Image: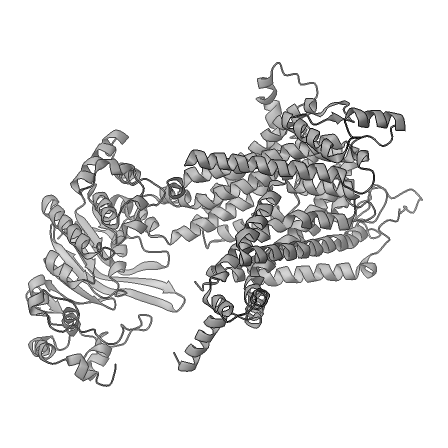
Amino acid sequence: MRVRYLLRRILQLALTMWLVATIVFLMFRLIPGDPTSTLVDPTFPASLRAEILHRFGLDRPLHEQYLTYLARAVRGDFGWSFYYNSPVVEIVGDMIINTLLLALATFFLTYLFGILGGVVLAWKHGTPVDSVGSLVPLVFRAAPVFWTGMLFLMVFSYRLDWFPHAGIRTAGYAATNLFQKYVSLDFLWHLLLPAVVSTLYYMGLPMLLVRNAMLENFGEEYVEFARARGMSEARVMFRHVLRNALLPVVTSAAVFLGLALGGQIVVEYTFSWPGLGREIVMATQRRDYPVAQAMFLLLAVGVGLMNLLADMVYGYLDPRVRLQ
Amino acid sequence: MLLQIEDLVVSYRTRAGLVRAVDGVSLSIAAGQSVGLVGESGCGKTTVTRALLRILPPNGFIERGRVLLEGVDLTRLSASEMRRVRWRRIAMVPQSAMNALNPVLRVGDQLVETIRIHEHVDAAAAWRRAEDLFERVGIERRRLYDYPHQFSGGMRQRVAIAMAIALQPALLIADEPTTALDVLVQDRILNLLEQLRADLGLAFLYITHDVPVVAELCDAVAVMYAGKIVEFGPLAQVFGSPSHPYTMGLLRASPKPAAEQSELISIPGAPPNLVAPPRGCRFAERCPFADDRCHLAEPPLEAVAPGHLAACHFAADAPRMRQTMATGDAWARAFAGTP
Amino acid sequence: MSRNLSEGLTLAAATGPSWRTRLGILRRILFRDLSTAVGITVIVLFVLVALLAPVLMTDDPWAINRRPNGTIARLDPPSRAHWLGTTDLGRDIYSQVVVGSRAALLVGFLAALMTTVVGTSVAVIAGYFGGWVDDLLMRVVDFAYAVPFVPFVIILVSLLKPSLANVIIAIALLYWRSSARVIRAQVLSLRERPYIKAARVAGAGPWRIIYHHITPNILPLAMLYMAIGVGWAIITESSVSFLGLGDPLVISWGSMLNLAFTTGAMQRAWWWVLPPGFSIILLVVATFLVGRSVEEYANPRLRGEV
């Protein structure tokens, strides 16, 4: 049963990705004006343009182009970057890792502090801790994440000079191997500001969800029964109520991961974090559309995989779903 | 005495005002004794149990009174001292184990957790004890690994009972432990409780609105009405020669063994509003025997026989009232004209 | 309970709440508590600022100002002449903040309106007609969820040509997904209510039922998504502008921050960074506060009417 469910979900995901890829294909080719201008630098001389168009098969009929495009996308071949003058595949590797690391750090911090904060708010329900505490995430949620980022840069980077203002590594820092490249104090030092800023932005959602779900559970008899058995308040909160309140939070994690991967753009751009999101912006600004297209597809795949993962976790956490 | 409740007053803060759900209740239970606390729903009997364990909801508080367990006043214990009393000395069987058990944890984990927060035993030993407990209440041990929703109602209640006796408490509070079950299963659960009491020498506080259950299981009985105890005494005396009209009505309202079954009645009217309770006897509004005095002065709880207390101005007249109750339909006459 | 009252209640249960009662409850809730009143006041103030911008501005927001000695007033801190200081090109920041409210409100309300209309229509049609219509529309919603939102908006806007209208269209094209999914669930449960079944048996056509019985009932939820949508659209617009992909001819809070960021002026010109940011926060928090009280209304459980 579970295997079949998993297979069905994977099939669904593949179908969705095919649709996304198709939309992207159409988006880049059916826009007003000369569609090839999005794919080949329009400032090139006509003969060179024609040659490039021919080389990439852009002079062939649309349906043929579509088929080659799909076949190539499946193989991970996203074409040629005008800006880097190299195959797109060759530049995405590091970016994927950088984006994932920032997204995971954000996810970890968001859910750690979001859940803890939610428990505290629920625990202190009806006190000033709760009323003030519920307002703070609202404000951070309303503040555009790039603005919060700018504030943090102004204070912690430019004024206090505690943290670097851009990038993932200090210039001239030479890592001897891949492991050292990411597991180093220098990297963490660069990671901290962007991760904290996006955490502040996203934290409100799990926090309020946990708070509300816990409050809904407070009236349940199992809470009273747990207290009757002599459990400490902390144990009642964290082991019993939180465990029940987590279900809606996990569902929200799917939405979160989608948002975080897509919304990462702004944080990456603000902190010059060399990931997929920043590259989409740079590529769009440079009109380097093959890169923008590839980054977009990769992000969509990432979002799809995260949603699949969240579905699995949800099924695991709720025994009532698990055993059906 | 194992447990002595003295003049306990428990109130809830509500939007309508302060509700005194329990108003001056005194009650005692000896070791190994089984006491029934009977009354309609909303009379405050569940509040008594919550106050005993000090698990009142946030708007509830003990206004006054003492709860002495083996001589220690529970109302004065600190939160952490109280936690050590809960379950080790006083445990409870909830009304519905379906709602009382955590739906997302395996029952075994919940049972083992309960053991291990009170006793320093390793996990393996606790699981072994959990298996023994399950066998003791008649469940296969492999079912420790199931979730609450996988059990039938009766089985779930057995799980709750296993949990209640896990630490060999001195007092077991059973709050309507069988109301949610069908009759056949009810009998089996009651037999199990009875047998455990005999084996383990537990004292029982049996909270119910079900008169026959009390008649079957209890040594003594307290009848509660609108936050107060109106009659208290040995089972045979309270049910055999009731001295408060409410007790008489309650008995007439409950089915008896087939032979002596007379017509079932229901007591007309509803309990008073506890935000602004009446000045006199709280039952006066519904009582067929009430006169002016009942509406003006509250009757004290006084002995009508050794060990048998009743709070009625006419307690001395109890035989006559019982007579009226048995022969005619007192309520029909007193309330002629009301449906 | 008096007889008339109980008859009235039965009647109400039979027909469901009308548009009038719904709007009445909504009005009561909106003006009941402080935070909602604050939210509404702030929104009204911003609308006034946007309408009265020509009067409120002290300067042409594009004008390059000069100091008394003739040099360009680059990054002057707040002063009597320039209440919130100047940009690196000597433009008056106060006037830019004032005129920026227009872009924010325009995008916020239009995008939210389009989003809500599309989302609600999809939800009602899918939920009411069910069957293959529902299946199809819900697959479209699933699909819309698979598309990363901000990247989609950025690329589409850049492909179409950066302009406010295209930002609005790009937001509306994708953002309707969330309202559609939630409102459809509500329609599904409404469809099974006795009074709607009764109306169907009595021969009322689907559009009549949708207009008279379904729509007034989902109105609060739709308004909740509208309120939240305004906030999100404002944030999205400012993000797009911040990333340098907004309309180059329009001054918006996001484009102001973009310049403060890309020119590096943010390192010291706090007066260029704080005002547009605070404006966004204030306006968006206001929409959230209003949304929160609409939510209380949309969710009877929170209102204490189980």
Quarter of the image with the N terminus of chain C is bottom left
Pick whichever, B223 or B109, lies toward us.
B109
Q: Position of residue B195 (x, y in %)?
A: 11, 47
Q: Position of residue A144 (x, y in %)?
A: 66, 45
Instruction: Answer whether residue B109 is visible to the viewer in this image.
Output: yes
Q: Compared to C294, does B133 lie above or below? A: above
**Which scheme is used to colour this image of the protein?**
one colour
Pick whichever, C80 or C2, lies toward us.
C2
Answer with the quarter of the image where residue A270 lies: top right
Pick whichever, A248 or A147, lies toward us.
A248
Answer with left or right where residue A151 lies relative to residue C50.
Answer: left
Q: Position of residue C113 (x, y in %)?
A: 67, 57
Pick whichever, B262 or B209, lies toward us.
B262
- Give the residue at the far top of this rendering: A176
Q: Position of residue A193 (x, y in %)?
A: 62, 34
Q: Residue at x 19, y 44 (%)?
A: B165
